[in-house]
Image (cartoon, rainbow, N blue to C red):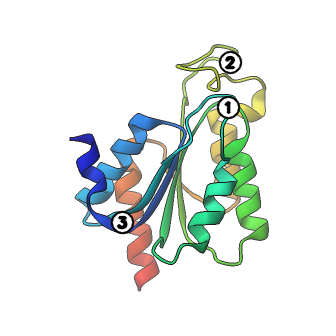
C-alpha cells in the first residue's frame, strides 16, 4: 500500500524528516483528490545529503509543484533555516504547509534516531512551529490535518 500513494502525479511536493509521515501526508493529499509532484525524505539523522532549504529551492523552481508540505521534527535547525530562507529569498511564494513532530518530547532525550533530540530551546517543536508561522508557513498541530490544510490552501490559491 505505501508506494501506491505516490502513483497519482500532481502538484504537491513533500519534503520530510520522517519516512512514515511522508506516506501519511501523501495518502491524505491523494484522498483529497490531489497528487504528488515529488516526495523527498531527507531523514532525521545528524548528517544528511541535502537540507530542507536545498529542497525548497528545487520545489520553487519546479513548474509542476504548486504547494509544498514540509514535515520536520525536534532537534537541529533545518526547519528554521528553511523558513527564514523562504521568507527572505524567495520571490516565488508557493504556499508551504508545515508540521513539526515531537511536540511532547522531553528535552535532552533522543526520540527515534540521532537527529531527533532537543539540544536547546530553539530545537523544540513549539519554538519551530512559532518561527514557521512567523515566516508565513501554514502550520498544522497534528499530522492528521496535513491533507485538509493542503486542500484549504490550494482552494484559496485557485480563487
The image shows residue 111, relative to residue 65, as above or below, that is above
How far apart are the two marked residues, 2 and 3, measured between alpha carbons?
34 Å
Q: Which residue is label 1 attached to?
A: 124
Q: Position of residue 49 (x, y in %)?
A: 66, 42
The image shows residue 124, relative to residue 136, as above or below, that is above
Q: Residue furthest top?
A: 109
Answer few, some or many: residues within 10 Å of disc 2's Cα (few below 14, many 20 plus, some between 14 and 19). Answer: some
**Circle number at residue 138:** none
> Residue 48 versus residue 152: which sits nearer the camera?
48
**Circle number at residue 107:** 2
Marks 2,1: beta carbons within 8 A: yes
Which quadrant is the C terminus positioned in? bottom left
Q: Closer to the N terminus: mark 2 or mark 3?
A: 2
How far apart are the two marked residues, 1 and 3, measured between alpha carbons?
27 Å
Q: Which residue is label 3 attached to?
A: 151
Q: Closer to the N terminus: mark 2 or mark 1?
A: 2
Answer few, some or many: residues within 10 Å of disc 3's Cα (few below 14, many 20 plus, some between 14 and 19). Answer: some
Amino acid at each position: 500500500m505505501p508506494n501506491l500513494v505516490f502513483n497519482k502525479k500532481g502538484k504537491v511536493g513533500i519534503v520530510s524528516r520522517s519516512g512514515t509521515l511522508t506516506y501519511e501526508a501523501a495518502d491524505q493529499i491523494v484522498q483529497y483528490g490531489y497528487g504528488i509532484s515529488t516526495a523527498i525524505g531527507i531523514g532525521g539523522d545528524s548528517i544528511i545529503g541535502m537540507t530542507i532549504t536545498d529542497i525548497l529551492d528545487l520545489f520553487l523552481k519546479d513548474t509542476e509543484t504548486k504547494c509544498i508540505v514540509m514535515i520536520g521534527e525536534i532537534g537541529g535547525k533545518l526547519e528554521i533555516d528553511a523558513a527564514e530562507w523562504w521568507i527572505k529569498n524567495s520571490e516565488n511564494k508557493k504556499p508551504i504547509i508545515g508540521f513539526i513532530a515531537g511536540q511532547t518530547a522531553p528535552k535532552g532525550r533522543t526520540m527515534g534516531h540521532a537527529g531527533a533530540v532537543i539540544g536547546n530551546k530553539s530545537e523544540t517543536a513549539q519554538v519551530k512551529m512559532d518561527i514557521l508561522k512567523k515566516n508565513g508557513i501554514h502550520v498544522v498541530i497534528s499530522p492528521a490535518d496535513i491533507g485538509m490544510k493542503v486542500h484549504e490552501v490550494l482552494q484559496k490559491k485557485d480563487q
